Image: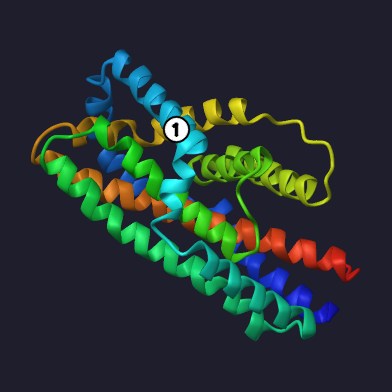
Amino acid sequence: MDREFNKQFKRLGKKENKILNKKENTLFKSKTAPIMDKIQGKIPEKLKLTLEAAFLKSFKLVFEKGNSYIEKTYNKDRIKLEHDLNNYAIDKKFSNKYVKRLDIPAKHSKRFHSTLTIFEGGVLGFLGIGLPDIPLFLSMIMRTMYEIALSYGYDYESNEEKSYILLIICGALVHGEKKKELSEQIDQLGTQIDTQSQIDITLDDQMNRTAHILSEAMLTAKFIQGIPFIGVIGGVVNFNIIDKIGKFAAIKYKKRYLLKKAREKNVQI
């Protein structure tokens, strides 16, 4: 069993390191930087603050009232049942076959929402609608996160788990050393939650932090999306954002699940 556990961690570690150490395409950046600088120079400071406030308001709306509505768009009980069956099989025999089955719902969710958000962002962008689609876009992000969490046996009702989800979103959207720093914080928070240790993070602080990072990541895209016809670019950006978040979330939740199993079975990693 120890050998199979270590094989799983080694395989997952390669995927994680690939994301954490991804290098920027310097040629592409050098070609696009002058254009992006020109666009960003025209973005009013008021819009930056408005966008961040819109994301913060949307997070609060989702966490206070939106979960029940989001849950109507997927079968929560079915995903939980699939996890329970896979988890039972893993408890009986820890093997790559059963561990891979845990990934199926998460992969389906990420693929579906990444594709859907191209259409949503592209249509709204074509019509010149930028800021009003933020609650809808955020709902897609949260649905993706919720389905991935359930796939690995984690519910999302507690403030601690909501903070964990928001921290993953932050980690997915930053770069370089900041990404590695947040990656360690995510792993630490996951362990603290699972071992019921003291947690030094609050949901309000994390909502503010995530709204800032998410707005920075999407600022230029939202500005372009508010311009009719040019705004179809927004759909591609929306796709990239959800794709990044989905990939990172699947790795982090799977890693957390495996660490939890290792503790339960006293396996040395």
Q: Amino acid at mark 1?
A: Leu
Instruction: Give whichever of 133, 66 is nearer the camera.
Output: 66
Residue 109 image offset from top left, x and y in percent: 43, 64
Residue extending farthest left = 229
The crowd level at tag 1 (other Cα within 10 Å; few <14, some 14-19, many 20+) is some
Residue at 75% across, 45% down? 188
State the image quarter where residue 164 is shown: top right
243 relative position to 225: left or right: right
Picture quarter with the C terminus: bottom right
Picture quarter with the N terminus: bottom right
Q: Can you see residue 18?
A: no
Instruction: Give whichever of 163, 248 is nearer the camera.
Output: 163
Residue 99 image offset from top left, x and y in percent: 65, 77
**Relative to 113, does residue 100 appear above or below in the rendering?**
below
Residue under label 1, please give it: 61
Q: Considering the numbered disc 1 on the image, is that residue within a helix, a strand or a loop? A: helix
